[in-house]
Amino acid sequence: MELDVKTALERFRMFIIYNTCLSLIPKGYLRDPTIFPERDPDKGEIYVEAASKIELAKIRDIRFVKVADILGVIYKSKTGNTNLKWRQIRGNIGRLTGVASPNSIVNLLEAKVITREYLEDYLKQKSEPPKTEAEGQETQDTTSTPQ
């Protein structure tokens, strides 16, 4: 599913945690909105672009970093089926764009990045047959006055 939505940074942070490290993140880190997981590109990249970043701990293949003044976040799944980028618009609100797998869609819903209505509208649009140019021309021909 292709995404292009505005969302709060904290919601995208929770999506990343749900998708990658919910079972191993320390409870204190989970509650702190300035702590993000990061991961190397060869294992499915998670990268936070920030003015300041301090590494706190490494658990398995996840590094937990404390960040300030975030400009963007890149998330790529291990499988490559999800590839999302969050870019700051103003404050903690940003635009999330990219492609999400079915599993990631479930976690995007859980983190409230997207709503059920957004998903239903997207699926409805995808199920409608696209209009062809010929159909558009037929409509014009039938509405024009005969000569």
Image (cartoon, helix red, strand yellow):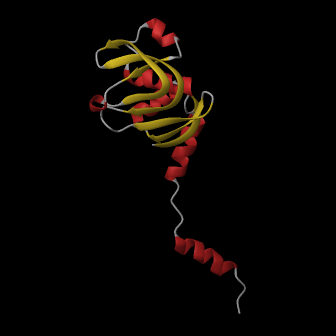
Q: Residue at x 70, y 89 (%)?
A: 146
Count the marks.
Answer: 0
Rendered location of residue 140, percent (x, y): 65, 77
Quadrant where the N terminus sits is top left
Q: Residue at x 54, y 65 (%)?
A: 131
Q: Nearer the viewer, residue 106 or 6?
A: 6
Q: Residue at x 55, y 27 (%)?
A: 9
**View extreme (bottom): residue:** 147
Rendered location of residue 112, percent (x, y): 56, 27
Rendered location of residue 12, percent (x, y): 51, 27
Rendered location of residue 83, percent (x, y): 40, 38
Q: Quadrant of residue 102?
A: top left
**View extreme (front): residue:** 51
Left or right, 144 with respect to 5, comes to: right
Left or right, 8 with respect to 35, comes to: right
61 above or below 100? above
Q: Nearer the viewer, residue 47 or 10?
A: 47
Quadrant where the C terminus sits is bottom right
96 above or below 67? below
Q: Nearer the viewer, residue 82 or 123?
A: 82
